[in-house]
Structures are given as structure tokens and as C-alpha cells.
Image (spheres, rainbow, N blue to C red):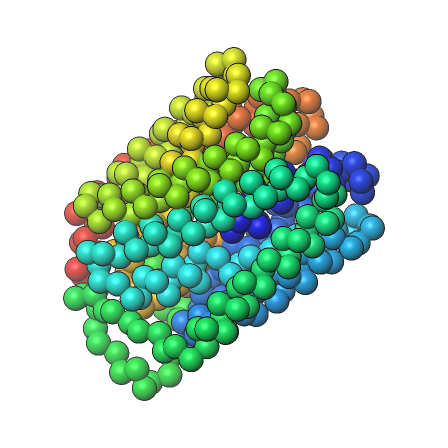
């Protein structure tokens, strides 16, 4: 997650070096997000069938190949194939649905959301560490050398998979889940569980909310350099602010996980999206200086990926954890469709108006929508479907 969430900071430099317009690069990052989402449910199903380590290893190899190809290519088409296609596939097989599905299966319901929050904090700390590293190396490394450096660091995933190779994954069933004979082979694609999930209104609304989350994250990660410029601040604020967001979210996701085990998750999500909308409106209507922008970054950081343990925890509360990797994978797909539009439309709006003013307003409006769609998911509905199944 650290690699994925910081490479967007290099967009202006890549645009100049490869002579690619901002909107075309933003479209490529959007396709990357879209493929990430499309791969997530498939990778989740494969992880449930063949084990987490094998899927993570395969995804890491593809991810590394994409980083190196992107760094070495000199053509816009080559960069698109590497950055949009290979990295998109690699991220989809190495991030949240795969990891959270494995973690969720190991914890009982009353501890699960907190565990998911701690795990999500790994991605947030990665964002902080890589953004800080980028800020320190950007002065003497060009964008392609940064891609090689970051791509090499992905070997850490390979080493982690090596240590996981002989570990049998344990499964802690909820009280509502029927026992399952572990000797029976699992089908690769449990489409019945997926179909039943999409018939549930609460699951549909969680997908809508996570679409907006993806829009927010992509707009700010891919276009952070442009947003900083829009606010009239120096360029170095971009990597610093993204690092602050990542560090603040280490606390945010853990607190969200802790809160999700105690209070109704959808209404916590309502609060998060409403506060995000307010923060984005502040960027538009309040003149920014460095102190205010860092304050924005801290508060946005607390909210940044705090939706992940709450949304995945709500999915687990609805359907149990047996198919959590695949069912949350489909929610992640919705997230990445939003990320596609956040990345692409951010570039289109900038090229059209020369400013991120309307992109930020659109993002704030979507935040209000996301807050509203979580209101109908009452505790009775969340518990009622699980009890009936």
C-alpha cells in the first residue's frame, strides 16, 4: 500500500519526462485502480481456495514486474501497460481483501474489527514511510529511479510469503455460521454466496459508500501535487502532507477498529464521510497556509482508511468470515471504480479548467451522499440478516 499510495506524487515529473498530458496519465492511474478492484474478488476467491501466501506471492511478482517495466520504458504506451495493467493486477492480489480476509478468519466477532483496524494500519504506516522516503530521495533520484527503488522493496512481500508457506490458516467460525468439514474441498468460485450478498440492501449501500471512499483516496493521492499547487503552497508540501495523512491514519484505523467493536459500524461510517466532505469544502473556501494544510492532513489522515475496518467488519457481521475475502473483494471493486473516476476526472477537470476547484467540490458532494446512504443501515437490519442466515 505504501508503494501504491505514493507513486501518484510523481505524476507531474512523469508527465514532463514522457511528454504525456496530465489527463492521460490520470486515466492510466484510473485504469490501474479499476484493475485493482476487478482483480480483488477473484484473488480473494483464490486465496480462500488455495491459501493466502500463494496469492500474495503471485501478486508481488506481477507488481514488481510492473514497477520495473514502468521505470525502464521510454514510451507512453509502455508506461500505460506497466503502470495501469501490471501494477493494477499486482496491487489487486496483494492488498486489503486478501490480507483482511485472512486476518478476519482468525478472530472472533467481538475482537475482529479491532484486529482489522490494526492490520489496516500497516497500509497507513506504509504510506507514511514511503512518502517520507520519496521526499528525501526526490532531490537526487528521478522518477524512474524511485520506481526501481520502490519496486525492489516489494521483495519484502516475497520474504513474508516464504515464512507463511508452511502455516495452515486457522478459521474461527461465528456462532451463526454452520460448522464445515475442512477436509471437503472448497469450490473456487462460490457464486451462490456472492449472489445472495448482492440481494441484500445493506450490502448494496456499503458498496455505494465505498465507491465514494475510492473517489476521495484517488483524487488526493494521484493529484496531491496539483491540490497543493491549487492552494498556493510549495511543492514539497505534497509528499509531506501525504506522509502526515499516512501517519495520522495509523491511529485512525486502530481507533475505528476499536470503535467498530463497540458501536454501530455504518453510523460510524456516516460520521467519517460527513467529516471528509466538510474538510474538502474547507480546501475550497478557506485560504490555505502551511499550518492549515497540515491541520487538514492530520484530520483527513485520521479519516483516511478508517472506512476499511468498519466496512469489512460490517460485511463480516452480515455474512460471517468464511467468504470474507471474496465478498469484501467485490466491495473493494466498487471502491476502485470510484478510484478510477476520482483519478481520471481529477485530470480531466484540471485540463478543462486549469484548477482543481470543481473536482474538490464534486468530491465533497459525494462525501455527503456517502454519509446519507449509511443512515438506513440500522443495527436491526445488520443483525437481522445474519440471524436469518
Note whether 93 is above or below 254 in the view shown. Answer: below
Relative to the observer, which residue lies in front, 141 or 6?
141
Question: Which residue occupies 21% across, 65% down?
Answer: 174
Can you say whether 126 is above or below 103 in the image?
above
User: Percent from the top left, x then y, of residue 153?
Assistant: 60, 58
Image-based side of 222 in relation to 217, left or right: right
Residue 272 falls left or right of residue 288: left
Tell me the residue at 73%/40% (across/down): 140
Q: How many marks?
A: 0
Residue at position x 29%, y 66% from top? 106
Q: Is residue 116 left or right of residue 244?
A: left
Q: Nearer the viewer, residue 351 or 275?
A: 275
Q: Residue at x 53, y 36 (%)?
A: 242
Q: Is residue 365 left or right of residue 71?
A: left
Residue 322 can be seen, yes or no: yes
Is any atom of residue 208 visible in this view?
Answer: no
Q: Residue furthest bottom?
A: 183
Give the camera-side residue of 134 and 346.
134
Q: Quadrant of residue 68?
A: bottom right
Q: Is residue 10 above or below residue 356?
A: below
- Residue 210 in the image, given as x and y percentages of width and height: 42, 44
- Residue 59 percent location from the top left of the image: 56, 65
Say if 229 sits above or below 19 in the image: above
Please provide percent x and percent y for residue 311.
Answer: 34, 48
Quarter of the rendering occupied by the C terminus? bottom left
Amino acid at each position: 500500500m505504501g508503494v501504491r499510495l505514493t507513486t501518484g506524487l510523481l505524476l507531474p515529473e512523469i508527465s514532463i519526462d514522457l511528454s504525456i498530458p496530465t489527463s492521460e496519465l490520470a486515466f492510466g492511474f484510473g485504469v490501474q485502480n479499476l484493475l485493482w478492484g476487478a482483480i480483488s474478488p477473484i484473488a480473494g476467491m483464490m486465496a480462500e481456495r488455495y491459501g493466502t501466501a500463494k496469492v500474495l506471492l503471485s501478486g508481488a511478482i506481477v507488481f514488481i514486474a510492473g514497477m520495473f517495466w514502468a521505470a525502464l520504458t521510454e514510451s507512453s504506451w509502455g508506461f500505460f501497460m506497466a503502470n495501469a495493467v501490471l501494477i493494477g493486477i499486482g496491487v489487486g492480489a496483494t492488498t486489503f481483501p486478501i490480507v483482511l480476509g485472512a486476518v478476519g478468519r482468525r478472530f472472533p466477532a467481538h475482537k475482529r474489527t479491532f484486529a482489522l483496524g490494526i492490520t489496516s494500519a500497516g497500509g497507513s504506516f506504509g504510506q507514511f514511510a514511503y512518502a517520507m522516503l520519496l521526499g528525501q530521495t526526490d532531490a537526487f533520484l528521478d522518477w524512474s529511479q524511485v520506481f526501481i527503488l520502490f519496486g525492489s522493496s516489494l521483495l519484502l512481500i516475497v520474504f513474508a510469503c516464504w515464512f507463511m508457506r508452511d502455516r495452515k490458516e486457522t478459521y474461527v467460525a461465528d456462532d451463526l455460521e454452520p460448522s464445515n468439514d475442512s477436509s471437503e474441498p472448497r469450490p473456487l468460485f462460490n457464486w451462490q454466496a456472492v449472489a445472495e450478498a448482492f440481494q441484500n440492501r445493506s450490502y448494496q449501500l456499503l458498496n455505494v459508500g465505498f465507491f465514494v471512499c475510492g473517489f476521495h483516496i484517488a483524487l488526493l493521492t494521484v493529484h496531491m501535487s496539483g491540490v497543493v499547487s491549487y492552494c498556493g503552497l510549495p511543492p514539497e508540501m505534497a509528499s509531506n502532507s501525504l506522509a502526515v495523512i499516512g501517519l495520522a491514519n495509523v491511529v485512525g484505523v486502530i481507533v475505528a477498529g476499536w470503535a467498530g467493536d463497540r458501536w454501530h459500524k455504518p453510523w460510524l461510517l456516516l460520521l467519517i464521510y460527513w467529516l471528509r466532505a466538510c474538510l474538502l469544502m474547507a480546501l475550497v473556501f478557506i485560504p490555505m497556509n502551511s499550518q492549515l494544510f497540515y491541520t487538514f492532513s492530520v484530520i483527513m489522515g485520521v479519516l483516511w482508511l478508517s472506512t476499511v475496518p468498519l466496512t469489512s467488519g460490517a460485511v463480516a457481521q452480515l455474512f460471517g468470515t468464511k467468504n470474507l475475502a471474496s465478498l469484501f473483494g467485490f466491495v473493494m471493486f466498487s471502491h476502485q471504480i470510484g478510484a478510477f473516476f476520482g483519478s481520471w476526472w481529477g485530470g480531466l477537470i484540471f485540463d478543462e479548467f486549469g484548477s482543481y476547484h470543481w473536482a474538490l467540490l464534486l468530491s465533497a458532494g459525494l462525501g455527503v451522499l456517502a454519509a446519507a446512504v449509511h443512515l438506513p443501515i440500522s443495527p436491526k437490519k445488520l443483525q437481522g440478516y445474519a440471524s436469518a442466515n
